[in-house]
Amino acid sequence: MQVYILRRLLQMIPLLIGISIISFLIMHLAPGSPVDILASRTATPEQVAHIRAIYGLDQPIYVQYWKWFVRIIRGDFGKSFVEGRPVLDMILERLPNTLYLNFVVAVIIYAAAIPVGVISALRQYTWFDNVVTSLAFFGLALPSFWFALLLIYYVALNVEWIPVAGIASYGYKLETVGLWAFLLDRLRHLLLPAIVLAAGGVASVSRYMRSSMLEVIRQDYIRTARAKGLSERVVVYKHALRNALIPVITVIGLQVGVLMAGAILTETIFSWPGMGRLFYRSAERVDYAMLMAIIMINAILIVFFNLLADIAYAYLDPRIRYD
């Protein structure tokens, strides 16, 4: 296992380098540049050229990439073209908020989707299975931004205690309002963004769980376990569920990317102070340094969670070995 983990960590290096090259090229091929934001409309061509020279944007793209790559190796993500602050400091201010939101959403997704998928498989073609299937397809087809706007219009504006923006109310600090009031306020602000992000995840993971469970419960060893007189609870949760979870574990790594991508619009709509909102604002202002830093951090998180998913395979199925 140790050799496998080391090999996977080494494989991450060329993968992340490839992601950085493609992202850097696409970003510079897109229309617009930070100079359009930094230079005023009355700026002369000489002033525009001077600004480009200050930020190195007058150099060939491969030179710009190499200088950026060398800085990244040293742990320097550079400074924001627009705000002039260190990019890493701005990201670290918002990364905990995004991780906090995505962690809660992931817990909701798997806590709801796995039981629903199991019950739906065990009660195939019943009214419960038909309702769950219909809701799952509806959730998969539901645009997250449209769902967020519907919740704001029909729920938040009619229920005063549900806020529509931010991560906490103004002045609600732990040392001033107490633990329970602080936690309740955080939960109220978390409610709508978590529902929007979790809707599609619950729908997709429950379908994966149902499909995997249906395949497992038809296996010979499940029939043998029932023939031995084992209770249905033992057959389902000890023998069937553990093997049915293996394909679902694969979705965890992919789900991280889905949540990070979905958080961009969700955080922007609900004014959640996370990396998604920061990415959206940076894209509007063509802030190359900030965009590349967020893309690389997201890529590292996705690759890391895919590695954790592979390690979880060996725990769930002892037949799997990474030698």
Image (cartoon, rainbow, N blue to C red):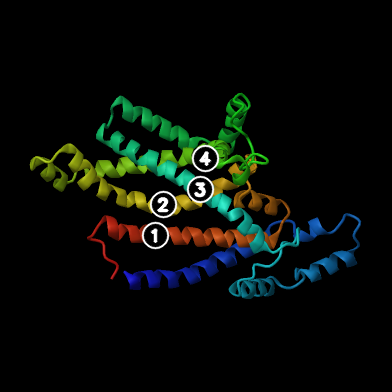
Q: Which mark is residue 102?
A: 3
Q: Which mark is residue 258?
A: none
Amino acid found under the numbered disc labelled 4: Ala
User: Where residue 7 appears, x then y in whole percent?
Assistant: 39, 72
Residue lying at 36% horizontally and 52% vertically, measured from the top left:
249
Give yes or no for contact between labels 2 and 1 (Cβ–Cβ under 8 Å): yes
Tell me if I can see residue 26 in this picture.
no
Q: Read off the residue under disc 2.
A: 252
User: Where residue 93 appears, x then y in whole percent?
Assistant: 63, 56
The residues bearing labels 3 and 4 have C-alpha atoms spaced at a distance of 8 Å
Amino acid found under the numbered disc labelled 1: Leu
Q: Read off the residue under disc 1.
A: 308
User: Where residue 91 appears, x then y in whole percent?
Assistant: 63, 58
Amino acid found under the numbered disc labelled 2: Ile
Residue lying at 30% horizontally and 49% vertically, measured from the top left:
245
Residue 44 position by quadrant: bottom right
Which one is in front in this view, the residue at disc 3 or the one at disc 2? 3
Per the image, label 1 sits on a secondary structure element best described as helix
**In which quadrant will I find the N terminus?**
bottom left
Residue lying at 85% horizontally and 64% vertically, measured from the top left:
48
Q: Nearer the viewer, residue 316 or 184?
A: 184
- Say which label, 3 or 4, has the lower sequence index: 3
**In which quadrant will I find the C terminus?**
bottom left
The residues bearing labels 4 and 2 have C-alpha atoms spaced at a distance of 17 Å
- Say which label, 2 or 1, has the lower sequence index: 2
- Say which label, 4 or 2, has the lower sequence index: 4
The residues bearing labels 2 and 1 have C-alpha atoms spaced at a distance of 9 Å
Q: Read off the residue under disc 4.
A: 194
* Label 2 packing within 10 angstroms: few (<14), some (14-19), many (20+): some
